[in-house]
Image: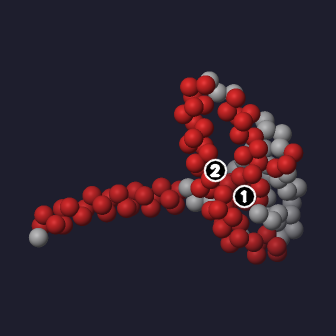
């Protein structure tokens, strides 16, 4: 019986690590937009779905940001960044939906993020 318990312990550590990674990646753009952690934008409390807008702005600026890196570094960073943006978009939408009552109750203190005319730098 003891050997069975030893076999399941590494899986508990893997599950715990996977849970920690999943929680740390949860709705990053939503948290960044609502708290104003991005120095380019003021806190977006009161604006509708600022995390999704920030994610879309990141997509529109992606080519110009990757052009600043050396090709070897960009080849490594591009797939990782794309994967994180794909995972973050629905999570930011969920996070923004949870914060929607607050955004509707508070008057916006900053203009919303306009991802269609992103300055990209």
Residue at (87%, 68%) from the top-left corner?
107
Position of 85 compared to 13: left or right?
A: right
Residue picked out by circle 2: 85
- Tell me where residue 33 appears, x and y as whole percent: 73, 55
Q: How many marks?
A: 2
Depth order, front residue of 37/78: 78
Position of 103 compared to 26: left or right?
A: right
Q: Residues within 10 Å of mark 2 (few under 14, many from 20)?
A: some
Is tag 2's residue or tag 1's residue first in the polypeptide sequence? 1
Residue at (56%, 42%) from the top-left corner?
80
- Tell me where residue 100 appears, x and y as whole percent: 75, 72
- Tell me where residue 60 appears, x and y as whole percent: 76, 44
Residue picked out by circle 1: 51
Above or below: residue 85 compared with residue 31: above
Give SS at disc 1: helix
Residue at (13%, 64%) from the top-left corner?
3
Residue at (37%, 61%) from the top-left corner?
15
């Amino acid at each position: 019986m003891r050997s069975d318990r030893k076999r399941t312990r590494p899986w508990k550590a893997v599950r715990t690590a996977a849970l920690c990674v999943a929680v740390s990646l949860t709705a990053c753009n939503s948290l960044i937009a609502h708290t104003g952690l991005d120095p380019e934008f003021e806190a977006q409390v009161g604006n509708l779905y600022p995390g999704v807008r920030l994610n879309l702005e990141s997509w529109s600026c992606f080519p110009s940001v990757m052009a600043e890196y050396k090709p070897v570094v960009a080849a490594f960073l591009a797939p990782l960044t794309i994967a994180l943006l794909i995972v973050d978009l629905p999570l930011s939408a969920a996070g923004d939906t949870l914060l929607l009552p607050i955004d509707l109750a508070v008057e916006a203190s900053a203009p919303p993020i306009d991802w269609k005319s992103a300055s990209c730098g």
